[in-house]
Image (tube, rainbow, N blue to C red):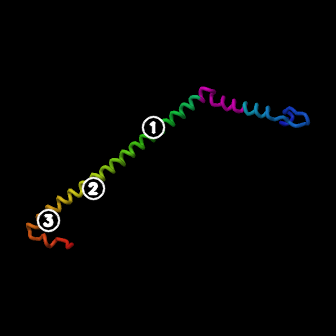
Amino acid sequence: MDLGSRRPKASGGLAISTNYYSNSRRTRAADKLNAIGGDSAVARIDAERRTVLLEIEEKAVRYIELKLGAMSAASALTVYREQHRSGISQHLTVRVEKRLHELGLLECFRVPH
């Protein structure tokens, strides 16, 4: 039996297909829904999907927090080193110049301006 013979005919011989196909689609959708176990399975799958998405979001936020914390710590360490480098250098320069002066070698190492 072909599909055309099962469809109701409209006046003028045209096949009316909207009701037949919409019923067919509903039947297929219902079959697919029944295949996964009905409403409770759909709700369970949706709840699991939402749970997984929330876990991904929480882990992404935690990663960003840790990444920003590490970047802040690296930046603070760089600033600290820069601020204290000049003080350490000056302290060493004074000690080295004092020792060179004691040895009488200070003039040998002076850079002309």
Magenta stretch: includes residue 17: no
Which label lies toward us, 2 or 1? 2
Q: Residue 107 or 34: which is nearer the viewer?
A: 107
Quarter of the figure that contains the C terminus? bottom left
**Residue in the foreground of this view, choosing between 40 and 1:** 40
Disc 1 crowd rating (10 Å Cα; few below 14, some 14-19, many 20+) is: few
Q: Secondary structure at mark 1?
A: helix
**Image coordinates for residue 97, horizontal then vertical, percent:** 14, 65
Residue at x-position 15% and y-position 61%: 94
> Which residue range is magenta in the image?
27-42
Q: The residue under label 1 is which amino acid type?
A: Glu
Please give the residue where the numbered disc 3 appears in the rendered image: 97
Q: In terms of secondary structure, where does tag 3 sit?
A: helix
Q: Which residue is mark 2?
A: 82
Q: Using residue 52 as the reference point, say whether residue 7 is left or right of it.
A: right
Residue 74 horizontal/vertical position (percent):
33, 50
State which tag comes first along the sequence, 2 or 1.
Answer: 1
The residue furthest front is: 113
- Per the image, the residue denoted by label 1 is 58
Q: CA separation, marks 3 and 1?
A: 58 Å
Secondary structure found at label 2: helix
